[in-house]
Image (tube, rainbow, N blue to C red):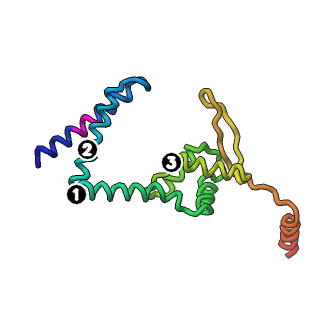
């Protein structure tokens, strides 16, 4: 059994080494490296399926990772809106900065990615809930998002004006 564990550990080290080599090659080169990498990964998967202890640990780890990744998606949209407003505050932030602020503020073990926040902020921008301004960054434009309350219009504006007059009259 110890030999098998040593073999699998050597496979994992080989997988990591092959991955590092693949990252150094050009995109359409290294066919033999890619085949070897796939074969080593297949051997490791086979071992994990055969070993119930490893399979159980891996399944539990995958379940926990799934929960961390989907926690943001399962959060109600109104709550996510509130997080965006709260962590934008009166400042202007890029998507990356906003994502980091949300992660740090929530103090929980969640996997919140920029792409998740970007999709949400883009929706809020299109709905007119957020404003943005472009800035030159390297060779492209990136946006800083911010919240600026819109002025009330129509009957609700009249009610607000009447309310403010009543408050001032008291």
Q: Nearer the viewer, residue 166 or 126?
A: 126
The magenta segment is: 11-15
Using the image, determine if residue 26 lies above or below residue 74: above
Q: Dot 1: within a 10 Å radius of its alpha carbon, few (fewer than 14), some, or many (20 or more) residues?
A: few
Labelled pair 3, 2 in contact (Cβ < 8 Å): no
Disc nearer the start of the sequence (3/2): 2
Q: From the viewer's perspective, is the residue at label 3 or at label 1 nearer? A: 1
SS category of the residue bearing label 1: helix
Q: Is residue 161 left or right of residue 144?
A: right
Alpha carbons under labels 3 and 2: distance apart: 28 Å
Look at the magenta stretch and give its main secondary structure: helix
Number of the label disc, if any, that sits on residue 113: 3
Q: Percent from the top left, x then y, of residue 142? A: 63, 36
Q: Residue furthest left?
A: 2
- Label 1 close to label 2 by CB (< 8 Å): no
Residue 14 part of the magenta-drawn span: yes
Please give the residue where the numbered disc 2 appears in the rendered image. Answer: 44
Label 2: element kind: helix
Residue 61 in the image: x percent, y percent?
33, 56
The x and y percentages for residue 29 are 39, 23
In magenta segment, residue 132: no
* Alpha carbon distance from label 1 to label 2: 14 Å
Name which residue lies at 36% across and 55% down: 62
Looking at the image, which residue is at 44% across and 58% down? 108
Locate residue 81, reporting x and y percent. Answer: 63, 58
């Amino acid at each position: 059994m110890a030999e098998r564990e040593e073999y699998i550990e050597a496979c994992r080290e080989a997988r990591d080494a092959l991955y590092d080599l693949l990252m150094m090659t050009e995109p359409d080169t290294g066919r033999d490296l890619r085949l070897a990498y796939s074969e080593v990964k297949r051997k490791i998967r086979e071992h994990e399926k055969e070993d119930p202890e490893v399979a159980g640990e891996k399944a539990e780890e995958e379940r926990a990772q799934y929960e961390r990744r989907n926690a943001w998606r399962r959060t109600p949209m109104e709550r996510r809106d509130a997080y965006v407003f709260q962590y934008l505050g009166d400042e202007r932030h890029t998507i990356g900065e906003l994502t980091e602020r949300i992660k740090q503020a929530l103090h929980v073990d969640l996997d919140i990615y920029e792409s998740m926040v970007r999709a949400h902020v883009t929706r809020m921008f299109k709905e007119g809930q957020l404003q943005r301004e472009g800035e030159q960054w390297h060779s492209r434009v990136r946006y800083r998002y911010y919240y600026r309350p819109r002025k009330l219009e129509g009957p609700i504006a009249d009610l607000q004006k009447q309310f403010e007059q009543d408050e001032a009259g008291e």
